[in-house]
Amino acid sequence: MPELPEVETTLQAIKLFENETLSSIKIHNPNLRWPIDININKKISNKKIHKIFRRAKYLIFDLSNYYLIIHLGMSGTLRIMNTADNYFKKHDHVELIFKSKKLIYNDPRRFGSIHITKSYQDHSLISNLGPEPLSDEFCGEYLHNVVINSKTNIKNFIMNQKNVVGIGNIYASEILFKSSINPTRIANSISRVECNLITKFSKNILKKAIKVGGTTIRDFFSAEGSKGYFKIQLNVYDREDKKCSKCQNTIKKITQNQRATYFCETCQN
């Protein structure tokens, strides 16, 4: 699914719609993870978009009196096209139409969602989120203070959006490899020094991934249509039975909470 770097890459591509007027919204299929508000067009058509920004994996459009929130789910993408173009793809569910361009939401699995709210901070999907991983708030001291009471494994802990936002399955495996921490370790066993390493490499890896446009594992494309190329830099994710870049032993794959985890038993302890 799109993780924070992929969402950030999409954000940078769609910022061209800032200060543009949203003429109308066409809903081809309202049945996403949650049904789209049937009054969405009435509420925000012909409104100016003042700013587009990201909170965790949510893309947020600041309009007059309302916020439009888009979550890409597991397979969602946004695609920029000319307004006059009539080319459509299967699973194109929503069109945000502007004067010369339009933004098309495509989602084969329909696990994404689109919401309208007066206050995005108070929205149920956003109000309980943890700090942004690239923020100063996400530091070793913060992480150590929250892991000490947790008995879940450290990989699931850093993927929990209430603890820190935006770290998904791919980057969690990569962060723990660089931190030399076994993903099966219980969170409250992680030392303060190790918490410093996790926050350090979280920032480092996410920044690098954003710089090269995210990770293409199956079908991620930015809104401009370009692929993410961080896959060429992955150390462990999707590298089962291949040699570890540090010790040359074999990368192992296990399942945690129904998700694939990749790690080196020798380097990560």
Image (cartoon, grey):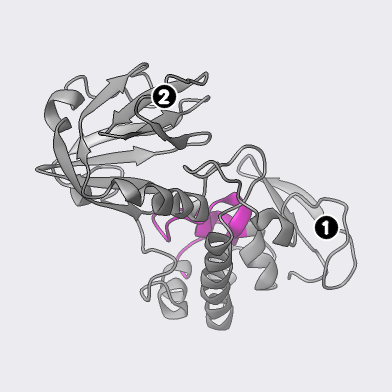
Does residue 179 lie above or below 56 as drawn? Answer: below
Identify which amino acid the numbered label 1 is placed on. Ile
Q: Is residue 90 at all visible to an observer of this figure?
A: yes
**Magenta range:** 148-172
Residue found 41% across the figure and 72% down from its top: 138
In the rendered image, residue 169 lying in the magenta stretch gets the answer yes
Tag 1 secondary structure:
loop
* Residue at position x 80%, y 52% in the image: 239
Q: Classify 10 Å Cα crowding around label 2: few (below 14), some (14-19), many (20 and above).
A: few
Residue named by callout 2: 85
Residue 78 x, y percent position in the rendering: 44, 37
For residue 178, which quarter of the picture?
bottom right
187, above or below 35, in the image: below
In the image, residue 12 lies at what x, y percent?
41, 54
The first of marks 2 and 1 along the sequence is: 2
Q: Is residue 161 visible?
A: no
Q: Answer left or right for 8 relative to 30.
A: right
Circle 1 sits on which residue?
A: 251
